[in-house]
Image (cartoon, rainbow, N blue to C red):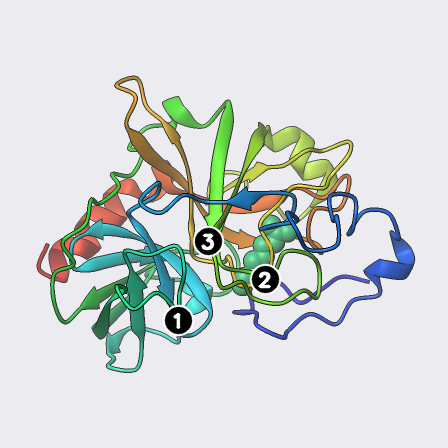
Amino acid sequence: MKQVKRTAAVGAVALSAFSLFPGAAFAHDDGGKSAKIVGGTKAEQGEFPFMVRLSMGCGGALYTQDIVLTAAHCVDGSGPNTDITATAGVVDLEDSSAVTAKSTEVLQAPGYNGTGKDWALIKLDKKIDLPTMPIAETDAYNNGDFTIAGWGADKEGGDQQRYLLKASVPFVDDATCKNAYSNLVEKEELCAGLLDQGGVDTCQGDSGGPMFRKDDSDKWIQVGIVSWGEGCARPGKPGVYTEVSNFAEDIKKAAAELGA
Ligand code: ARG
């Protein structure tokens, strides 16, 4: 029983996971006090200033001060678009000091057809005065431990979150990930998660948000975009992320088309 992948997610999960994997979904759940993203904790205000919540129920990251990098499956296509609201500058989505901006245009990855190429850019109607996050331009950082963050569900079928949650997940190599997902697009997708035990992962509503790590200068760099997975945090089923370095040139070019 496989969940629909790459749907922008809120409420899109109808899983029998709890009966199939009774321990897995709740392995890190202590009744709601600290079970977050899945298996994470609350982010500090200002810890990840580039994090954006998008009104369709996805995450994103500030690529420039007025361009958000998100997932292709979070948007409907390319062209003028004034429907999306981006919320930034807060961990608490109800914080009155949140900065919001509206979309003016969306650029979905050229050739996106639901498999791989899961990236898109959203142009905002104003600059948001917060730090942006550079993207990885080579595969040098496609290893080690990654940070994931988002306001998505804290367990399979769980609620969207008011507070930004974060967790750390290790890189899973393509060959190993291919065992979990025969349809993995190895050049375009990157896997991460605790393969044996599960318990930590992104989940529905985290899509489009960044997966990132520190570069050699100790600065955050984006290596992935939350894309899909079978359930959330299941043992043997890592999270699948867009391999940002593979699309760095395309993203740069697309951003230039949006006036970056
Ligand atoms: N497709 C989901 C979304 O739209 C993201 C799922 C990520 N799943 C995972 N197991 N890492 O929000």
Asked if the residue at label 2 sits under 8 Å from ligand 1, the reply is yes
Q: Quadrant of residue 245?
A: top left
The C terminus is located in which quarter?
bottom left
Q: Which residue is mark 1?
A: 75
Q: Which residue is mark 2?
A: 204
Where is ligand 1, by quadrant? Answer: bottom right
CA distance separating discs 3 and 1? 21 Å
Please name whichever residue, 87 or 226, is drawn nearer the observer in this view of the structure: 87
Please name whichever residue, 92 or 107, is drawn nearer the observer in this view of the structure: 92
Q: Do the residues bearing badges 3 and 2 touch, measured as CB atoms within 8 Å?
A: no
Residue 157 placed where, x, y %? Answer: 70, 66
- Please say whether residue 73 is visible from this viewpoint: yes
Task: Classify residue 216 as left or right of residue 181.
Answer: left
Q: Which residue is mark 3?
A: 164
Task: Classify residue 249 as left or right of residue 259.
Answer: right
Q: Do the residues bearing badges 2 and 1 touch, measured as CB atoms within 8 Å?
A: no
* Type of amino acid at the residue the image marks with label 2: Gln
Residue 110 placed where, x, y %? Answer: 32, 61
Q: Residues within 10 Å of mark 1 (few under 14, many from 20)?
A: many
Question: Is residue 177 placed above or below 110 in the rendered structure?
Answer: above
* Type of amino acid at the residue the image marks with label 3: Leu
2 vs 1, front mark: 2
Reading the chain from its start, which is encountered first: label 3 or label 2?
3
Question: Is residue 107 placed above or below 215 in the rendered structure?
Answer: below
CA distance separating discs 2 and 1? 15 Å
